[in-house]
Amino acid sequence: MARIPFVTPSVVPANERAAYDAFVNKRGSPPSVGPYALLFHMPELAQRLESLRLCIRDEASLPQKVQELVMLTVAREMDCAYIWYAHAAAAREAGVRGDVVDNLRGKRNLTGLGADEQAAVDFARELLRNRKVRQATFDRASASFGQRGTLTLTNLIACYAMLAYNMNAYELEAPAHATEPALPV
C-alpha cells in the first residue's frame, strides 16, 4: 500500500476535472495501480508527464532495446521496484539479453554489451550517480546515438528518474510479476 491513497474520480476537484478526463480518455480508463494512480492527486501534472513520457518513448533516435535497458538501469540505480516490474520482461522482449537483465537486477558486472548498450548504461549510471557525465561518456553516447539520440537518452533518464522519485517517496509497491523476479531493494 502506498503512503497515500490512490485517486478515485469522486475526489478529483472540479477545477482539475478536465485534465483528469483528458488523461482517462487518452488511456481508456483511470489508472488504478502504478505511478499515475498516485500522480492523479495532481491531474494536470499527471497528464503533462504522461505526454512527455510518450513523446520520449516514441522518439526513433534511441532504439527500443536501448530504451528498455536504460529504464532498467534507472530502476536499479534508484532501487525502484515498480519500474523494474514494469520493464524487465519488456526489455527481454525488446532484445536485451537475459543475462544482462539478471546481472543488472543482481548488481553484477555487465559483460558482452554492444558498444551502444554500454554507452547508454554508462551514461545513465554517471548521470544518476554524479548528476553529470564526463566528456568521454558524452562523446561515446553521441557517437552511438547522435545529437538527437543523446538528448533523448538524457530525457528518458530524467523522466523515469522523476517517476522513480515519486514511487519511492510514496512507497509504491510493485506487484509480483508472472515471469520476472522482483528487484531486491
Image (tube, rainbow, N blue to C red):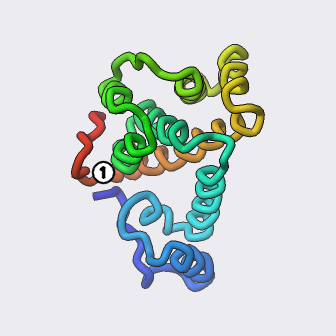
> Which amino acid, mark 1?
Ala
At 47% from the left edge and 50% from the top edge, which residue is drawn?
166
Q: Secondary structure at mark 1?
A: loop
x and y, in percent, of residue 28 in the image: 48, 77
Q: Give above or below for 128 relative to 165.
A: above
Q: How many marks?
A: 1
x and y, in percent, of residue 94 in the image: 45, 43
Q: Nearer the viewer, residue 77 or 1?
A: 77
Res 104 → quadrant: top left
Q: Nearer the viewer, residue 75 or 144?
A: 144
x and y, in percent, of residue 167 in the image: 42, 50
Q: Give above or below for 144 relative to 19.
A: above
Give the labeled residue for mark 1.
174
Q: Give above or below for 171 relative to 77.
A: below
| Quadrant housing the C terminus | top left
At 34% from the left edge and 56% from the top edge, which residue is drawn?
3
At 23% from the left edge and 47% from the top edge, which residue is drawn?
179
Res 25 → quadrant: bottom right
At 52% from the left edge and 22% from the top edge, which residue is drawn?
114
Mark 1 nearby-residue class (10 Å; few <14, some 14–19, many ≥20):
some
Could you tell whether 85 is left or right of 178 in the image?
right
